[in-house]
Amino acid sequence: MVAVVAAGGVLAACGNRRSPYMFDARGSEAHRVAGLWWLMFALAAGVYAVVGGFILVAALRGRGTPEGRASRITENAFIWLGGLLVPTAILMVLAVVTVQTTSHLRRPERDPLRIEVVGKRWWWQVRYPAQRFTTANEVHVPVGRPVEIGIDSDNVIHSFWVPQLGGKVDTIPGQHNVWRFRATRAGTYLGECAEYCGVQHANMRFLVVAEPAAAFDRWVARHLTPHSAPTSDLTEKGQLVFLRETCAGCHTVAGTTAQGDEGPDLTDFGSRLAIGADTVPNDPGNLAGWIADPQSIKPGILMPPTALAPGELHALVAYLESLR
Amino acid sequence: MALTDDVRTGITEHDLHEIWKDAPGIPGFFSTVDHKRIGLRYIYTSFAFFFVAGLTALVMRAQLTAPNSHVVSPSTYNSLFTMHGTTMIFLFNTPVLAGFANYLLPLQLGARDMAFPRLNAFSYWIFLLSGVFIYASYLIGKPPDGGWFGYTPLTGGTYSGGVNLDFWGLGIVFVGISTTVGAVNFIVTIFKLRAPGMTVNRMPMFVWSILSMAFMVIFAVPAVTVATGLLELDRLFGTKFFVPHLGGSVLLYQHLFWFWGHPEVYILFVPATGMISMIIPTFSRRPLAGYVWVAASLIAIAFISFGVWVHHMFATGMPVQAMAFFSAVSLIITVPSGVQFFAWIATMWRGVIRFSTAMLFAIGFLLIFLLGGITGVMVAVLPFDWQVTDSYFVVAHFHYVLNGAVVFPIFGAIYYWMPKMTGRRLSERLGKLSFWTMFVGFNVAFFPMHILGFLGMPRRIYTYQAGLGWDTLNVIVTAGSSSPPARASPSGTGPGASGGARRRATTRGAPTRSSGRPPRHRPTTTSPPHRSSPAGIRCGTSARSPTPSRATTRPPAASGPKGRSCTRSPSQPASTPSPTARNASLTRPTCRWCSPSASPSCSSGCS
Ligand code: HEM
Ligand SMILES: [Cu+2]
Ligand SMILES: [Cu+2]
């Protein structure tokens, strides 16, 4: 029951999700880039209007004359001014702005929150090394505090991108990249894989939940409390199914014998907003469908379908949704 | 230099014909080394590939029209964009320009053929076979799906076990060889086979652009051949060049690939600007402004284009100082393009523009390239690129440059030169219709993609969720890209439809080969071409101006070498509107191999 209500709330929250519009900036880097964009947009609009105007006038001004119209602007003036001097001036402005903007971005800051993200096929592993817990497809950060995300891959190249927070950082196997930013406003922001990484590249999303420090601390604290055993008969049965089936070979649930790492850590699965790297909202119906046949929801992924008796599936769903 | 005197060599005109004649029948079809036949084959073949790649784009757009649709499966979509990109870059754009260069270069230089005619035939056949080879992957039911730049480790054996990527990798290796060989041929032809008297500062601008392109090719293409070659060694023989946990480097692949990949966009773009530099002067009735400036820009681009490749790797987490360098160079490279741009505007400024189809395509090119160039400057700005790279903004940008700023000039060139190549006139009415549908369709299809990028839509996704603000824009994009003529061959009379004309082309085309002897170039003694007065340097419109009724059946091209007078007569009237003026092919200067900007070559190519 609780799960259903929670899922309803989640659904509503998802329904409200806003477009990942990069100039609706909610992070330090996105703010700077948005500022840069509006400057470039103004320049570009001006350049397009002026040069486009020249093209049209050049095309039309000779109309109806036998030999073309004379002009005070010499050909060399066109080339020197339009081709060399003005562009160079604009480019110098841009170069200065570029260097200035870049120097403010991705700089190390004191006392950052460290997070390690690993791009998997086709989901994201998220670790909080200092706090020593792992989750997946959902990154929580406190608003205002500097965040340092280490970005890695042990498979192919992906790219970590949250348009409303800032630019991309690729996950390069064999290379440790770092992305530094601050969230400036609370909210849930859509993240996406931006480097083609195989069949389910399109559905390799994630969510960044930026929340006030207090809420973030509560979220962390919940992960640090020892994980309680199932509290009802149903969830207990669900746990048995989970450990008996193949699930445990691929998934981890802290405090149990399930320690697989092929798939996302499910220790806090019930509290997550979505299933399958933000492919479908997290509700019992979707979860049951996911377990029975993940390939129909996200074709080509590395999780096999599992045939279960209806009662067992029900119990398994209840168990997973109870994990927080 | 080639022979100038049969007394000295003892070779007669007749002997030359015999030596260079194609063998009859089917063996002749395969063994021909005639640059004109090969050039046309390049053009027809690459348009066939263009057509196929256009279809794949349509299917992709059908899939993306609505969120969560199931027109094609995820893996099919992935192979579609891979084949689309690969075909467009390697099998359409690069070779179609090589085709024009093959056809035009000897004519504009006054040479009998390319420097290495057999090598020329070789590169065509290799191109054809590698294209067919890549598409043969459909026979095993699994086309390549690694994206057109085939990043490792995704394309390595671990994550792409099937042979489908070997079709891709080996195909690219061979098509690279074909391109390189072709470039060597262009360079030697330009340096060694110019007609006596044609100094480099009198070469038509198209020749300059091919020279610049060919130099980029010989330095850049080996890099991609090496990248895909090493990838194939990894895949087929278990080497570890790109296997990260065994000491390989995945970024090495990217460096090799983009060391070619960025010059490649200029390899495509520079010949297109060469075409524009021929078309605009002709239809402005002015010599090209700033000949030296434009030629110098082409050379500058060839150099600078090798200093910018890292802008394709801004998100890979390289040191910021290094990236700032490439960011700056990427800004600088726009200057030579700006110079060319204003040379074209200056050419038009004092001219009288005739809005032929070719000229419309040229003006459309200016308007489109202006935007593509501006967004190009934007993506050179490092932090901005972090945001928009690999998003639909970049898809918009490169289609503005590749589809707009390269394909529009190619279409313009078809309307400009094809009548002479095939002996068939293209309908101006249909041509203009096709220009306007293409121009409008193009902008409707690709402009909204900029905004989709801002709204956070990544490229290469086979589907997307509803409610992200992308739905309406995607409908518009599909509507624009499916406006049928947007990618149709020119109004049905274009290359695709003129199979009959091809056969005639070799006899009705330019006379160089049949004249047997390279013409002597007659330079002006007074002033270099770009400074001459327009009337004095224009290739004359045919002295025997055909009547309209004759022209429709026998276009000027068909009137044979003798009718193609290219006199540099200052008395030639500047084609004031006449009853025939509405008809493009009549008022065009008869000598189309070159344009007013380079009249001396005209006298060599046409007299
Ligand atoms: C005829 C109209 C065209 C349409 C409607 C079209 C449409 C598309 C679409 C839908 C994509 C896939 C975007 C994605 O999923 O990321 C794409 C990618 C691409 N297109 Fe086009 N395109 C057209 C013409 C061209 C031309 C003329 C060129 C180059 C000469 C070109 C070069 C490319 C390249 C290189 C890619 C990237 C492929 C990849 O991501 O691997 N396209 N195009
Ligand atoms: Cu991806
Ligand atoms: Cu580039």
Image (cartoon, coloured by chain):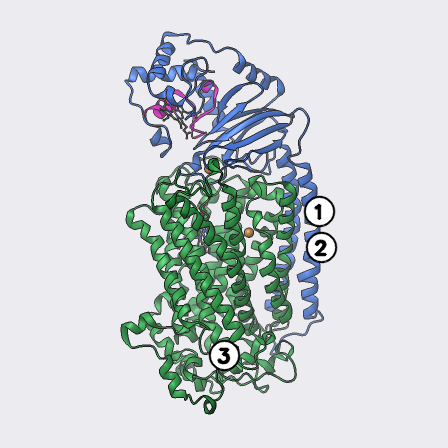
The magenta segment: A269-292
**Disc 3 crowd, CA 10 A, few/some/many (<14, 14-19, 20+):** many
Report the chain holding disc 3.
B
Chain B: drawing colour: green
Mark 1: which secondary structure? helix
Report the residue marked by disc 1. Answer: A96
Residue at image mark 3: B110
> Where residue A74 sits: x, y (%)?
70, 70
Label 2 vs label 3, nearer the camera: 3
Label 1: few (<14), some (14–19) or many (≥20) C-alpha neighbours in 10 Å: few
- Looking at the picture, how far across and down is residue B9, in whole percent? 45, 88
Q: Is residue A7 left or right of residue B531?
A: left
- The residue at which mark 2 appears reads as A89
Q: Disc 2 vs disc 1: Cβ atoms closer than 8 Å?
A: no
Q: Do the CB atoms of the residues marked 2 and 3 lie less than 8 Å apart? A: no
Q: Quadrant of residue A113?
A: top right
Query: Which chain identifier belongs to the blue chain?
Result: A
Toward which corner of the image does residue A129 lie, by quadrant? top right
The residue type indicated by label 1 comes to Val
Q: Nearer the viewer, residue A222 or B580?
A: A222
Q: Is residue A77 left or right of residue B243?
A: right
Task: State how far apart marks 2 and 3 are (Cα).
Answer: 42 Å
Chain of the residue where label 2 is placed in the rendered structure: A
